Image: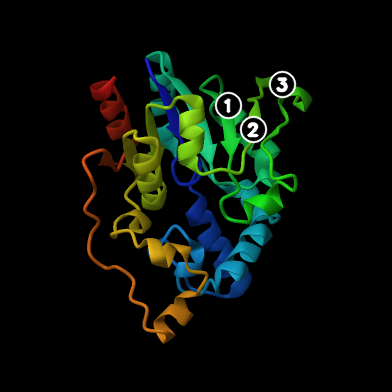
Amino acid sequence: MAVIAVDCDDTLSRTNETICRWHNETYGTDFTIDDFEHFQYWRNRGWGDRAMAQKKVKEFNHSAAWNEIPVIQEAIAATKKLKELGHTLIIITARMASEAERTRDWVSAVFPDTFTEIYFTSAFESRVASHPSGQDVEAANKQPESVSGFKLLPFKSIPKPKSDICKLIGAKVLVDDSIENAYEVHENAGIPVALYGDWKWNKKEMDEQAANSPKSHAQRIQDGDVEPSKPAQLPAQIIRTTTWEAVVQLVQEQF
């Protein structure tokens, strides 16, 4: 059996749909989910540059809308089945360290006895700022074992790329909605990736230069920076799985 690494946002939860609605209500925009063309919000129209997008994400995290993020229903049965097949499921999420406890509470309640632990990488802000010491943070000894009748998962906050966490836990496959994460993990951890979901932000060819630029969507247009428009040509070990049923099938075929 295998260790399976699983992303959280838009793999287990419908986060972008919720933040889209929140942004419209807060900033008077008219976004739909199709306006989310990139994993990095600042590359999408109306989000501002990277610093502004990070500020907005923090605002969202402190809003009532955060508590309204729904689960992706098909993920519940699918992850439970993978667990029953004998696999070990571990969440690796880009969420900030400050969101660790309530994310842990949500996962523990919605996916009881399914996941083993959760790793937080704080990818949407400075990892050094998230972890002032620059060191890995483990709070397992301080965490309660259960609340309101359900067992709480242990979590760790480690400011490193997902590939490093995959190697640390011995993951044999990653399930993630981000094409950027898929390439990073495939190239640096050498494991297959199930690129999950029928999402617009994981369908275009990846542009590493654009992904690393702090410019806003408007600034990139003004500067003549062209975003890739052709469909992504995925390597053999990055497998597009638009449903959780397809994820389960892939895991069964590989392990």
Residue 20 picture location, percent across and down: 51, 62
**Colour convention of the picture:** rainbow
Q: In which quarter of the image is the C terminus?
A: top left
SS at circle 1: strand
Circles 2 and 3, Cβ within 8 Å, touching? The answer is no
Q: Which amino acid does label 1 sit on?
A: Glu
Question: Disc 1 marks which residue?
Answer: 117
Nearer the observer, 68 or 216: 216
SS at circle 2: strand
- Residue 37 makes an appearance in the image: no
Question: Disc 2 marks which residue?
Answer: 156
Q: Which amino acid does label 3 sit on?
A: Ser
Residue 1 picture location, percent across and down: 37, 15
Question: Disc 3 marks which residue?
Answer: 146
SS at circle 3: strand
Q: Residue at x 63, y 48 (%)?
A: 96
Nearer the observer, 231 or 84: 231
Residue 238 picture location, percent across and down: 28, 41
Q: Distance between the residues labelled 3 and 1?
A: 14 Å
Nearer the observer, 123 or 114: 123
The answer to whether residue 137 is left or right of residue 70 is right
